[in-house]
Amino acid sequence: MAWTQDDLTAISAAIATGARKVRFQTHETEFRSLDEMLRIRDQIKAEIDGTTTGGLIVVEYQSGT
């Protein structure tokens, strides 16, 4: 699932109000703890900002001959 700014806004609002349920695009999630929500919020923000780690790396090699 590609995260959106709306998803980040939704989880941030839930954190601010103490809610544990958040509606993301097509589904609703109930988190177990504030710590879990903060972790997911940071992951969403990193993906939106383009600063996530991991993923696919493609390397091209050409022979010198």
Image (spheres, rainbow, N blue to C red):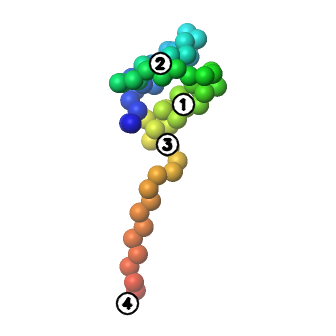
For label 3, count other residues whose C-alpha is less than 10 Å away and answer few (under 14), some (14-19) or many (20+).
few
Q: Residue at x 60, y 27 (%)?
A: 36
The residue wearing badge 4 is 65
The answer to whether 7 appears left or right of 37 in the picture is: left
Q: Secondary structure at mark 1?
A: helix
Which one is earlier in the sequence, the residue at label 2 or at label 3?
Answer: 2
Compared to 3, does 24 lie above or below? above
Mark 2 → mark 3, Cα distance in angstroms = 23 Å
Q: Point out residue 59 in the picture as x, y percentages from the top left corner.
A: 42, 67
Q: Residues within 10 Å of mark 1 (few under 14, many from 20)?
A: some
- Closer to the eye: label 2 or 3: 2
Residue named by callout 2: 22
**Residue position marked by numbered label 3 in the rendering:** 51
Please tell me which of labels 4 and 3 falls first in the chain: 3
User: In the image as oriented, which residue stretches furthest toward the bottom?
Assistant: 65
Residue 15: give its label: none
**Residue 65 in picture, x, y percent from top left:** 37, 90
